[in-house]
Amino acid sequence: MYKWLLYIHVISAIVSIGPFFVLMPMLRKLKDAEGDRLDTYLDSFTFVVRLSKHTGHVLVVSGLLLMWIGGYPWTTPWIFGTFVVLFASLLFMARAFSPTIRRFRQEGQDRTTLVRKLARSLYLYLFVLFVMLGLMVMKPALWG
């Protein structure tokens, strides 16, 4: 059972992180896109954010089950560190993407500023995801 949970955990990590890379080339195109093309790009951003949220649920549940079956305590440094970063990323994600995407759909918004904000959010969120991935893979002894 442990190996299957680990497999589910890894696949959910891949699906949670991977689609964000598809958004990178779209950032430049958002500045000039109009009409249906703009809606398509914005819908892609919305889809990736939702997909990441839902696969994140699978990731957390499978991680908790792996902790339980594997006998890892909450005080294990890399587990505790991952959860700290996870909660910070949840707060960040709630405010990083959706409000900016909504502003894109409003008339009279400065697209250059919004694209910069989306790009900063995208790269920062990827950094946070890679920090969590690093903690999970390397399992560093952060203390004691």
Image (cartoon, grey):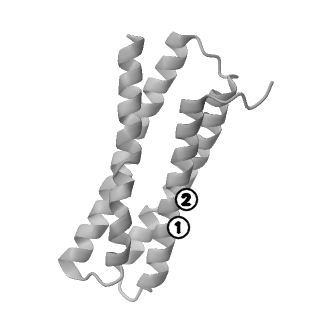
User: Is 39 on the left-hand or right-hand side of 126?
Assistant: left
Q: Quadrant of the C terminus?
A: top right
Q: Nearer the viewer, residue 50 or 81?
A: 81
Amino acid at circle 2: Leu
User: Is 138 on the left-hand or right-hand side of 61?
Assistant: right
- Mark 1 and mark 2: Cα distance apart in space: 6 Å
Q: Are marks 1 and 2 in contact (CB under 8 Å)?
A: yes
Q: Quadrant of the N terminus?
A: top left
* Number of numbered discs overlaid on the protein picture: 2
Relative height, residue 139 to residue 96 (above, below): above
Relative height, residue 21 to residue 79 (above, below): below
Give the labeled residue for mark 1.
120
Give the labeled residue for mark 2.
124
Instruction: Tell which residue pokes out farthest to the right in this image.
Output: 144
Structural crowding at the residue carrying mark 2, measured as other residues with C-alpha within 10 Å and reported as few (<14), some (14–19) or many (≥20): some
Instruction: Tell which residue pokes out farthest to the left in this image.
Output: 36
Residue depicted at 39% across the width and 89% down the height: 108
Q: Position of residue 15 (x, y in %)?
A: 34, 41
Q: Position of residue 132 (x, y in %)?
A: 56, 40
Residue depicted at 46% across the width and 69% down the height: 118
The mark found on residue 81 in the picture is none
Element type at mark 1? helix
Q: Can residue 143 be seen by looking at this rendering?
A: yes
Element type at mark 2? helix
Q: Can residue 96 be seen by looking at this rendering?
A: no
Q: Position of residue 143 (x, y in %)?
A: 78, 29
Amino acid at circle 1: Arg
